[in-house]
Amino acid sequence: MKTDNPEKGSLYQEKKPRPFRFSGSFVALLLIGLLLIHFLNLFLQWTVIRKELAHGPAFQTPEYTFIGFSLFNQKKIAAVQLLRNAAPSGRIFAFFDLLHPAIFMIWNNNQKEYFVDLGPVVMAVPPGSSRVSLFPGSVFLLQQGRKTVVKYFGDAIVGQAWHGFLAKKISGRGGNAAPLTGSFVVKAPETSRYLKIPYLIYFFLPLLLLGAALIHFGPVMLAGCVYYVEMFFLFDYQNLFVNVPFGWLFKLINFENSEASTRFFAAGLAIVFLAGTILGFWHWQKREVSAWQKRILLFFVLLPLVLYF
């Protein structure tokens, strides 16, 4: 029998799941949290550099004065520019801001270049007044008047690209018309009491957080190993993956680590983390994941960028 009434859909038809979107409140809290981590990371690097220099510089350098966070010490920073001849051999004033882990105002009262210890590097500064700004990503800028030079003292895969970007940006302002030499020597973090601290935190603290997420949420959180895959390219992977976190173990077993073996161990560990990431995303596709799992993964993805910059 035919009917003129078309079939009507059931009131209880299955609803399609809505695509997941991060709420505005979560995005705001995430940005605030990442900015806080950025500041804490800058403060950590500043503290490490200050402790390294207060413990004893590598050379007999002029007297250091550590001012602190620039926003809270604007008057002091303006006043120290009048103290160029306060000491016969010169003075070094240091502070940090939201973009630089350390900035050094150096007065070299000698008649020739003078090697000064600036924490992670020992560098030669010309006579007179100069300024050295340490950028995130192991780049420093040496300025004296209109003369500038940008140098890279790290060993990261993307570090040279970051250095090239900063150098091009600064040369575009006409600063490199008369460049300085900028000679420097890099310190080994694993041999320093303080310079190794950031590497230890970068390696072990996220590992503990990742372990807690695995225990609570299961193997899908192995996808968070993407943090270490990113860190392999952004930071000095030999120090971050081998020399600093496992240097004590090599000393314990009396193993002399060559550069080739260090690279081999670091690459092997990176492959392990990459395999963990792939396994985590494989579990991710097999089962439904909660909103908190997606939020935690996003945090692990963004964290290396915040620590780098």
Image (cartoon, rainbow, N blue to C red):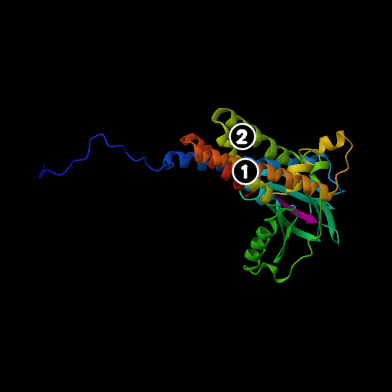
**Crowdedness of circle 2 by 10 Å Cα count: few (<14), some, many (20+)?**
many
- Per the image, the residue denoted by label 1 is 227
Q: CA distance from mark 2 to mark 1?
A: 10 Å
Type of amino acid at the residue the image marks with label 2: Leu
Secondary structure of the residue carrying tag 1 is: helix
Q: Position of residue 4 (x, y in %)?
A: 10, 45
Above or below, 254 against 87 in this view is: above
Would residue 293 appear left or right of 21 to someone viewing this image?
A: right
Above or below, 260 against 288 in this view is: below
Would residue 203 appear left or right of 33 to someone viewing this image?
A: right
Q: Position of residue 98 (x, y in %)?
A: 61, 47
Mark 2 and mark 1 residues within 8 Å of each other at the beta carbon: yes
Q: Earlier in the sequence, mark 2 or mark 1?
A: 2
Relative depth, front residue between 78 and 49: 49
Specify start and end residues of the magenta stretch as a single range.
Answer: 102-108
Above or below, 7 against 116 in this view is: above
Above or below, 162 against 63 in this view is: below
**Crowdedness of circle 1 by 10 Å Cα count: few (<14), some, many (20+)?**
many
Type of amino acid at the residue the image marks with label 1: Tyr
Residue at image position (72%, 43%) is 269
- Per the image, the residue denoted by label 2 is 210
Residue at image position (74%, 38%) is 197
